[in-house]
Each structure stands twice: as C-alpha cells, then as structure tokens.
Image (cartoon, helix red, strand yellow):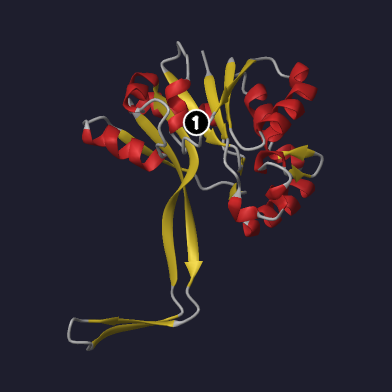
Amino acid sequence: MKEAIILAGGKGTRLKPFTAVIPKPLLPLGDQSIIEIILHQLNNLKFDKVHISLGYLSYMIKASISSYSHKLNYEIEFIDEDTPLGTAGALANISTKSKQILVINGDTLTDLNLVTLLSFHKKEKAGITIASHERSININYGVIDVNKNNELMGYQEKPILCYLVSMGIYVVDTTLLDFVPLNTYFDFPTFVMKVKEKDHKVSIYRYEGYWKDLGNLEDLNEALDDYSNDPQKFI
C-alpha cells in the first residue's frame, strides 16, 4: 500500500502579498494549482491514500480539491491543524497501516519519480530517506579568508558555492512516527536528528533532475515558464 502526506498548512510568508488572499498550494501554474499537480502525480503513480495537512486558509484548499477529487483514484484524508505544527508535527496525527509514508511539501514542483524514491528507501533499509538536490550560489564579491590575527590566508574572486539541499520530499518508516510529539510544533530537521540520535539509518537520495521550491519567488517565476512550456513533464 502506497500512502503520502502533503504538507499544505503554511502561510507562505515568503510569497506575500500573493498569499495574503490565496494559500500557497493554490497558486496557479498554468491551468493547474501547485497542489493539483502533486495530487495528479500521486494518482498517476497509483497511490492508495493521501493525507493533506491544512492550516492557513484551509477551507479554500478543501473547496478546490473537492471540485476535482472525482478524478483521483485514491482516498483523501484532511488533517486540520488548529495551531501551526511545523513541517513534521502533522505526522503525529496520521492513522496508517503502511510500513512507510511519503512526505512532500505542498510547494514542490519536480519530475522526480516518487515510486523510485520509495524503492530506494526500501533497498537502503533506511528509517528516513531525504530527497536532495544540488544548488549553487554565486557570491558577487571577492571572498577573503583570514586567520585569528587578521592576516590574509586566501582570496577568491566571486566564487560559486555548491550545497546539497533537501527537496522537501521524504520517505519515513511509520514505526518512527512515535518520535513526533502530539499537538506540538515540530520541524523536520529536528525529527531527522532525533531519529538519527536513536541510531536509525537516515539515507540521502541525490536527484539531478528538475526541482523547484515554489515557496520562493525566484523559483516560482521560473516554474511558471517551465510548466507552461511542458506541462506533461510533471504529470
């Protein structure tokens, strides 16, 4: 049985003023909203049940999903957050019989095959698998390296720094959900480190394909063009 939870309860503060009147998961990319694209991806991959964690302007998301839920071949369960629970807190409210659950942020656009990610997780026998992507940052200054005596040790002109970042997509063994406190704000990095401290394996899945964090305006603008040019790439 394949289950997923979409985290769609955030206020989208990085995208104000757009999110002052519409929740971030309902921001349109072409003819579909962000969350609609994710839901159709899960449908095409034959998921059996999808939980959706809601908070800010939840009634709008529920109304939107109800208008096309007849097109989806899985059960949908809404989880209402009375107070913000962070990126992991909602996991404590899941009722599931699956051995693992896919967790995906509701502001993610990717062409990653989520079933491939699940297979990787099982093969690695991990407690948690984090989907990751390499991002680079251009530093438009000369960067100097100094010692404690303020003497020059090195100099780089406009370096490019590369980082491996979380895509906001995870696979979690459901036996580990007991580590998530009930009705308490709890973010995913805290959850991951708690699991690791208890000697459970945390694996990293490196993905070099398409991924955008639609919670920031630069990625959102790029995704608008990318989705409009090739919507089938994401469905």
> Which residue occupies 47% across, 28% down?
90
Closer to the camera in the image, 100 or 52: 52
Relative to 200, 228 lies left or right: right
Residue 138 at x, y percent in the picture:
50, 71
> Which residue occupies 21% across, 31% down?
199
- The amino acid at mark 1 is Val
Residue 88 makes an appearance in the image: yes
Residue 193 at x, y percent in the picture:
29, 39
Residue 17 at x, y percent in the picture:
70, 55
Residue 220 vs 152, above or below: the answer is above
Residue identifier under label 1: 103
> Which residue occupies 35% across, 35% down?
191
Q: Which residue lies most toward the right here?
A: 31
Relative to 214, 173 lies left or right: left
The C terminus appears in which quarter of the rendering?
Answer: top right
Residue 72 at x, y percent in the picture:
71, 19
Q: Residues within 10 Å of mark 1 (few under 14, many from 20)?
A: many
Residue 118 makes an appearance in the image: no
> Which residue occupies 72% across, 52% down?
18
Give the SS element for disc 1.
strand
